[in-house]
Image (cartoon, helix red, strand yellow):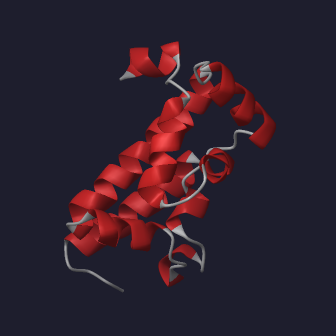
Amino acid sequence: MAAVVLDGLPSSVVKRIGAFLGIRATKVGSIVKVSEKTLDRRLKSGARLKPDESERMARLMRLISLAVSTLESEDNARQWLQRPLRELGGQTPLQLAATEPGSREIERVLGRIEHGIFA
């Protein structure tokens, strides 16, 4: 995975993640801190994401995969990722997904769910 991130993920992955989540590609871009203009330009030209952008996108993809696995369905994961959670200070998991500390907090909450610890 490291080589893929260093080479840059295809910008089309942003569209696929958006389609999965039911949101616009530009919203996915804002989640991973890629400006709308930059993302639009990359999507139109078919350019790859830069390594730092690819790393944040890979982190989001990992969280989505973990949510699907933990919550046992794509629909449950989609809803959970977009719901404000008390455990996350009232923020949604997607709002925290752009940073490594935020991602670790999401993983911690999913781990608690997986082990039946809800509070």
Q: Is residue 44 left or right of residue 104?
A: right
Q: Position of residue 13 (x, y in %)?
A: 48, 35
Instruction: Name the quadrant containing residue 119.
Output: bottom left
Q: Is residue 82 above or below residue 1?
A: below
Residue placed at 20% from the left, 66% from the top?
72
Q: Nearer the viewer, residue 75 or 3?
A: 75
Q: Nearer the viewer, residue 34 or 3?
A: 34
The number of numbered discs placed on residues in the rendered structure image is: 0
Q: Position of residue 5 (x, y in %)?
A: 47, 22
Query: From this viewpoint, which residue is outermost toward the front?
Result: 44
Residue placed at 65% from the left, 53% from the top?
27
Q: Position of residue 85 (x, y in %)?
A: 50, 79
Q: Is residue 104 above or below residue 57?
A: below
Q: Is residue 119 above or below residue 75?
A: below
Quadrant placement of the N terminus: top left
Q: Is residue 69 left or right of residue 47?
A: left
Query: From this viewpoint, which residue is outermost toward the right?
Result: 37
Q: Position of residue 50 (x, y in %)?
A: 62, 21
Q: Nearer the viewer, residue 117 or 37?
A: 37
Residue placed at 46% from the left, 58% from the top?
21
Q: Is residue 73 left or right of residue 88?
A: left
Q: Is residue 3 above or below residue 72?
A: above
Residue placed at 63% from the left, 29% from the top?
43
